[in-house]
Image (cartoon, rainbow, N blue to C red):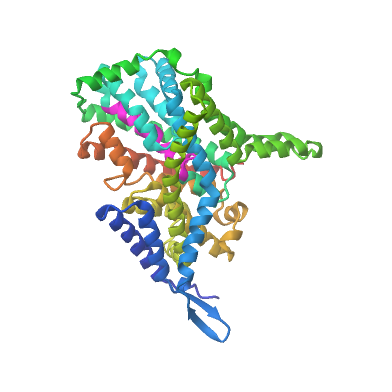
Amino acid sequence: MAEPPTMDWYPLVLLGLGIGLISWLLVYWRLNAFLALLLAALVVGLLSPRVIYRAEPGRERVLALERVPGEVARGFGETMGSIGIVIALATIVGRAMTESGSAERIVRSSLRLFGPEGAGEALLVAAFILGIPVFFDTVFLILAPLVLALALRRPEKYLSYIMAVAAGAGITHSLVPPTPGPLTVSVRLHVDLGLAIQMGVLVAAPLAVIGFLYGVWMNRQYPVPLRLDDAAKKQSLEMQMQRPDKELPHLAWALCPILLPLVLINLPTLSRVFAGNASQSTWWLALVSFAGERNIALLVSALVALWLTARQQRWGRSELARFTASALDEAGMILLITSAGGAFGKMLQHVGVGESISLAAQHLGIPVLVLAWGLTAMLKIAQGSATVAMITTCDIVRDALARQLGLPVEQLTATEMTQVLGYHPVYLMLAIGCGSKIGSWMNDSGFWVVCRASYLTEVETLRSWTIGLVLMGVAGLPFVWLLATYWPHPL
């Protein structure tokens, strides 16, 4: 009987060192996340014998420090190449929906649907919808003035309104592509984007309700006063609520940039189901697959969103060009940080963290779903970024699965991962997303967006926003586990 492989703790030491270094650079030195991740990737690589040595004929190991920057750049480039276009286009869509008034139209329609007493539920639905193509910080800043305006009329429900937006947009940010975290994880785990969106929405919806209900409970137990003493600000908010509907796009047009890519992305899967094995349908299946490719679907959405913005604002070509350039400037920093997170994950892969964690999990009997959830939560608490935590965990777990199969990571497919896991890797993506909801505190930009935009104190933000996210993340793990157990192949 073969002896079990011995446990190598050095990669885990390097993992801890990397996390600690990122946290120190971000929290103490206030260094930009892109630079902090890049430096951590270089340090981990330089301390790893697997990276800085190479084998040559006649000599066992040769020092090769020059390999480290190249491997960091390769990890950066692989991430940028896989998600760069989609994130850039999604940023344009998000900015255009704000500028055209589409976001406000969706909120107003939700308010009409639920009525004056259902303003919290209306905000929850609107934030959930907007959180699919638009990043969390942007959604919250878009809806914060509406929350304040509604609270001027119903101040006793202020905290429940805040938590409605936080829960709706916060959960889709981590579970539903094309936001950077779930998008990158779905690509690296070879999960079909249409399936990732469908399952992300399925899991995110009940978790958003849990977060909202916690907000309602907190509003009763620890009500928060509306600290808005600026008369000019109040008048501005009232004027925004009284803005004529005719200045906003029709609801169908407002929803178009969100629904259009979702429909296109899911069309190939549905078409293959209806076509079966009919050979005569090959040409239109190819056409549908082209239109449903994620980059094409988001490109169509971005063009529609830009056209709608230009029409609503009565812009010419020069104004539209300036707006598009501004949106892409915003996307640039998001892409740099996300890709630097990919570079850090690549170095952890080279170090052998995946192999060490896999062995530790086997010895301790920890299921992969729980391992992925817990590791993401640990990374999120340590360094603050949900996206970085998700990408890093994905690379570690993916490497561990590849080693179990004896394959290079590049050759790992969704089918092979399903054989090892016993369920589709989409559930691994969802578990990682739920884990990223744990531990949003002072090192998380989202914490400060909620705190400052809502005029909350740090303590009030911790016991509402932070604990609400924890509840959603904790509730998500057993929900994903149940789905993986009883519906392992959701295709």
Q: Residue at x 30, y 57 (%)?
A: 25
- Look at the image and tell me whether residue 485 can be seen: no
- Look at the image and tell me whether residue 282 can be seen: yes
| Residue 281 at x, y percent in the picture | 78, 36
The answer to which of 473 and 385 lies nearer the viewer is: 385
Relative to 451, 486 lies left or right: right
Q: Is residue 174 magenta?
A: yes
Q: Quadrant of residue 284?
A: top right
Q: Which residues are magenta?
A: 159-180
Q: Residue at x 25, y 40 (%)?
A: 462
Give the vertical position of 96 relative to 191 (above or below). Answer: above
Q: Is residue 222 magenta?
A: no
| Residue 400 at x, y percent in the picture | 50, 61
Q: Residue furthest right?
A: 280
The answer to which of 396 and 365 lies nearer the viewer is: 396
Give the vertical position of 398 relative to 170 (above or below). Answer: below
Relative to 184, 238 lies left or right: left
